[in-house]
Image (cartoon, rainbow, N blue to C red):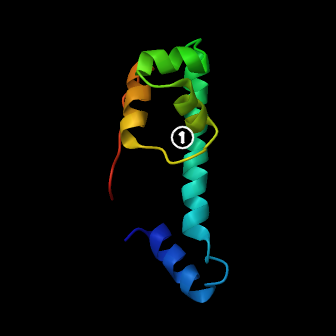
Amino acid sequence: MSTFKSHLEEKKQEHPEVFKNFEQEYLEFKIQEIAAMLRTERKKAGLTQEGLALLAHTQKQAISRLENQRGNITISTLWKVSKALGKHLEVSLR
């Protein structure tokens, strides 16, 4: 285990009340980060949500939900959108 992970685990045990919602908050942060990346890449490509939806073979509402963190993000939708943006989607388990 890395030094950071060891330190984090130690702090979780010392102060469980502080870390009670840590994992959920971290997940929400990562979703916000993904949404911001998608929005940035869409705008860099000069696309509207509707234009990206057409390229990704999905609906404008799906792009809006991704960018506004409404609903669950599926891997298949992320893959279609990243492909439409000319990007490579990477998912890893550690």
- Residue placed most toward the observer, 2 or 67: 67
Q: Where does the image place residue 26, in percent across and percent down from the top left? A: 57, 60
Q: Which residue is mark 1?
A: 34
Looking at the image, which residue is at 62% across and 72% down? Answer: 21
Q: Where does the image place residue 83, in percent across and percent down from the top left? A: 38, 23
Q: Is residue 87 above or below residue 30?
A: above
Q: Is residue 85 above or below residue 11?
A: above
Q: Indicate the amino acid at tag 1.
A: Ile
- Mark 1 element type: helix
Looking at the image, which residue is at 59% across and 69% down? Answer: 22
- Residue placed most toward the observer, 77 or 82: 77
Asked if one can make out residue 61 in the rendered structure from this viewpoint, the answer is yes
Q: Is residue 12 above or below residue 52?
A: below
Q: Where does the image place residue 79, in percent across and percent down from the top left? A: 37, 32
Decide if residue 68 is on the left or right side of residue 34.
right
Query: Which residue is most to the top?
Result: 46
**How many numbered callouts?**
1
Which image quadrant: the N terminus?
A: bottom left
